[in-house]
Every structure is written in C-alpha cells, then in structure tokens.
Image (tube, helix red, strand yellow):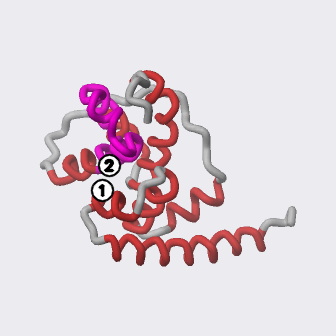
Amino acid sequence: MDATATFEDFYGANRDRVFRTVALALPGDADAAEATAEAFVRAFTRWRSVSRHPNPVGWVVKTAINHQRSRWRRPRIGLPVPAVESAPPEPLEPGIVLALRALPERQRQVVALRFLCDLSTEQTADALGIATGTVTAHVHRALETLRSSLSDLEEDDPSN
C-alpha cells in the first residue's frame, strides 16, 4: 500500500472485504461487526505503521480476529455492545456463504484469511496461532468439502 494513502481511502476501499472476511471467520455477524470496527479504530490510531505494513488489510483482519478471541476469553460482565452502523457489504453468492458457514470453524477461518483477505499461508498461521502445515491441511480439507458442496448445489439447481 502506498504510505501516502489516507486512512479514509483505505477504509472506504476495504471495509466491506474486511467485514466479509471477519464475518466468515467468526461465528456471528454482530461479533464480526464489533470486531471489525475495533480493528479499524486500532488501524487508524496506528496508521503511520499500518500503512507501511506489507498487507494492511491482513493486519486489520488479524487484529479483528485477535480482538474477538480476547473478548471470548474475558469473563462476560453484561455490558451491551453498541451496534455498528454501516452500509451492508456486497454479498457473496448465497450458496457459497452457506457452504462456507457449514465448514468447521477453523477451516472457515483459514479459507476467509487465505482467499478473501489474500493472506499468505505464513500470515494466516500467524494470525490464527497455528502451524503453516496446519493451515495447508485445513485449506485442503475445506476446498474438498466446498467442491463437493458446491457441485451438489449445482446439480440441484433446476436452471442448469
């Protein structure tokens, strides 16, 4: 990313992609919205260094997932989380979303980071705190499952 790009340009160009990636990686859209908002706030406060990061979008996604992971570890104290108002992201094909949501959580996270956020295997492993071989194995299993699920959907589609 060009270090002279403004945060506003970065946010406008990437907020939907980051939200979709985080929404697929995390179990609930409300959690994804809150985690995405928090990650962009952190990116804004560190924009000088984030803008020079090799993959600023990956940094934001990793921050969102880590933020949510930390929230899950903290005891719940019953404070409401304010809703984040934003334009809905451009939707993915419904059949693809259903197939992705049916994957086990770790496979869904790996697919979201590798393919929607375009992180490398090493960056994905670092973001999730797992080995690179584990990322590769999860990608392989997930893609096999998705191929099977999507070909079943295609066979069931009467328009084909």
Note whether residue 158 is visible: yes
Which numbered marker is on residue 127?
Answer: 1
Q: Amino acid at mark 1?
A: Ala
Residue 23 in the image: x percent, y percent?
A: 44, 48
Residue located 47% across and 62% down the image: 111
Residue 87 in the image: x percent, y percent?
A: 53, 28
Marks 2/1: CA–CA distance: 5 Å
Residue 136 in the image: x percent, y percent?
A: 41, 74
Residue located 37% across and 45% down the image: 54
Q: What crowding class fits label 1: few (fewer than 14 Cα within 10 Å), some (14-19), or many (20 or more)?
A: many
Q: Amino acid at mark 2?
A: Lys
Task: Say left or right for 54 vs 72.
Answer: right
Residue 82 in the image: x percent, y percent?
A: 32, 29
Residue located 86% across and 66% down the image: 160
Query: Is 55 covered by the magenta stretch?
Result: yes
Q: Does the CB distance between marks 2 and 1 fall below 8 Å?
A: yes
User: In this orientation, which residue lies closer to the viewer: 57 or 23?
Assistant: 57
Task: Say left or right for 68 vs 92.
Answer: left
Which stretch is magenta?
39-65
- Determine the secondary structure under disc 2: helix
Q: Which residue is mark 2?
A: 62
Note whether residue 30 is visible: no
